[in-house]
């Protein structure tokens, strides 16, 4: 392992380095993160991101695929950030708020932090969510795990010890959470980041996994079409056929379960077992539009 990667296993020895002040999503912002790992990327490195896999992130950092395209959720998260931060300021006038620059950890220029704001000695992250899945009781640290990774990454870089998370849920409900620095969790993320940078430097491609982002990356890599047959291993053929059969069987069972859920819900909105939400029914033009499960494959694993 190189000296750069070895440095990733050690705690910060000094304060963070200011890289610059950039508009989120701007070319300068992307350039500052191109050769490092940002807070929104570290969850992918450890396999906890619902949006990106270690495989897709590695290929993007290699320049083999294009940058992540801005989704509607990303757009509105960026647009709503100032308003959410202003709401936090209304509830905490005692905490002076300043926009944060982009930082890199001392001795680890690849460990990048772009906190939304500093509020006194603490950090603040503003989030939006279409529902409250993954968000626990307000005032706790019960937030979606990929956001927790982001908070710990930023705390590890900046030296701050607490990160507030202000979230607007379903466009109308405001909540606050508080994540405190955990040196053990931060070390796990730091070491995983160092291994990722080592693999990036030495062209060690991550294994193919079941994340949708991995499959989309593989779809984007080949260019053109050669009208030829390519022999594959019989083991891969058998695995593919077995997976197809299992998928079709599971798809039929899932469709049946969704039908029974809708029948049980009737005109209701949510299916629950006690306080556990199972699924949510949405309606358009007076009829059922979707039945949304309350847990996703990424967070359930």
Image: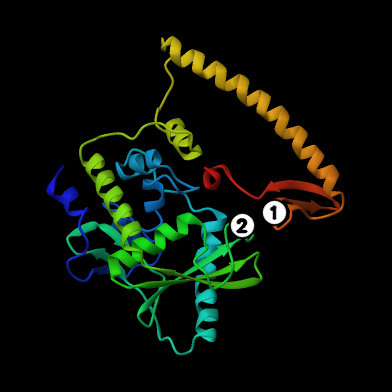
Residue 287: x %, y % from top left: 85, 49
Looking at the image, residue 97 lies above or below residue 211: below
Which image quadrant for residue 133?
Answer: bottom right
How many residues crowd mark 1 within 10 Å: few (<14), some (14–19), many (20+)? some
Find disc 2 in the rendering and name its residue.
Answer: 133
Query: What's the residue at 37%, 52% (across, down)?
Result: 42
Distance between mark 2 and mark 1 Cα atoms: 9 Å
Is 226 situated left or right of 87 in this image?
A: left
As drawn, is 202 to the left or to the right of 160?
left
Reply above or below: 123 against 210: below
Residue 162 in which image quadrant? bottom left
Q: Nearer the viewer, mark 2 or mark 1?
A: 1
Pick whichever, 84 or 161, lies toward us: 161
**Which colour assignment does the render follow?**
rainbow
The residue at 42%/42% (across/down) is 53
Q: Spot the residue most to the left.
A: 3
Residue 206 x %, y %: 34, 35
The relative height of residue 271 versus residue 251 in the rendered view (above or below) is below
Position of the N terminus, as image quadrant, is: top left
The image quarter in which residue 76 lies:
bottom right
Disc 2 + disc 1, Cβ < 8 Å:
yes
| Residue most extreme to the bottom | 94
Task: Decide: is 62 above or below 153.
Answer: above
Decide if residue 171 is in sight here: yes
Q: Position of residue 195 (x, y in %)?
A: 26, 44
Helix, strand or loop status at disc 1: strand
Q: Please state the horizontal and vertical placement of residue 27, each as a whole percent of the image.
A: 35, 58
Name the one closer to the observer, 26 or 125.
125
Which element is circle 2 on?
loop
Residue 277's mark? 1
């Amino acid at each position: 392992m190189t000296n750069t990667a070895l440095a990733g296993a050690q705690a910060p020895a000094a304060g963070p380095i200011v890289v610059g002040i950039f508009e989120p999503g701007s070319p300068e912002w992307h350039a500052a993160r191109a050769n490092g790992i940002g807070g929104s990327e570290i969850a992918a490195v450890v396999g906890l991101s619902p949006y990106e896999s270690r495989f897709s992130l590695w290929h993007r950092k290699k320049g083999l695929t294009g940058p992540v395209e801005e989704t509607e959720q990303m757009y509105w998260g960026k647009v709503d950030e100032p308003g959410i931060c202003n709401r936090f300021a209304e509830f905490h006038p005692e905490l002076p708020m300043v926009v944060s620059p982009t930082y890199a950890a001392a001795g680890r220029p690849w460990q990048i932090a772009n906190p939304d704001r500093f509020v006194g000695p603490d950090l603040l992250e503003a989030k939006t969510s279409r529902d409250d899945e993954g968000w626990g009781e307000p005032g706790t640290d019960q937030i979606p795990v990929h956001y927790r990774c982001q908070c710990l990454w930023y705390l590890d870089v900046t030296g701050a010890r607490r990160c507030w998370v202000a979230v607007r849920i379903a466009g109308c409900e405001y909540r606050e959470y508080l994540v405190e620095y955990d040196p053990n969790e931060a070390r796990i993320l730091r070491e995983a980041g160092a291994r990722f940078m080592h693999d990036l430097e030495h062209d060690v491609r991550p294994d193919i996994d079941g994340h949708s982002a991995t499959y989309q990356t593989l779809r984007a890599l080949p260019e053109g079409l050669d009208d030829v047959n390519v022999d594959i291993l019989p083991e891969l053929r058998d695995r593919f056929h077995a997976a197809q059969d299992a998928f079709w069987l599971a798809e039929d069972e899932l469709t049946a379960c969704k039908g029974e859920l809708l029948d049980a819900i009737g005109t209701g909105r949510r299916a629950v077992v006690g306080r556990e939400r199972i699924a949510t029914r949405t309606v358009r033009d007076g009829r059922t539009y979707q039945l949304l499960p309350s847990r996703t494959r990424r967070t359930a694993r």
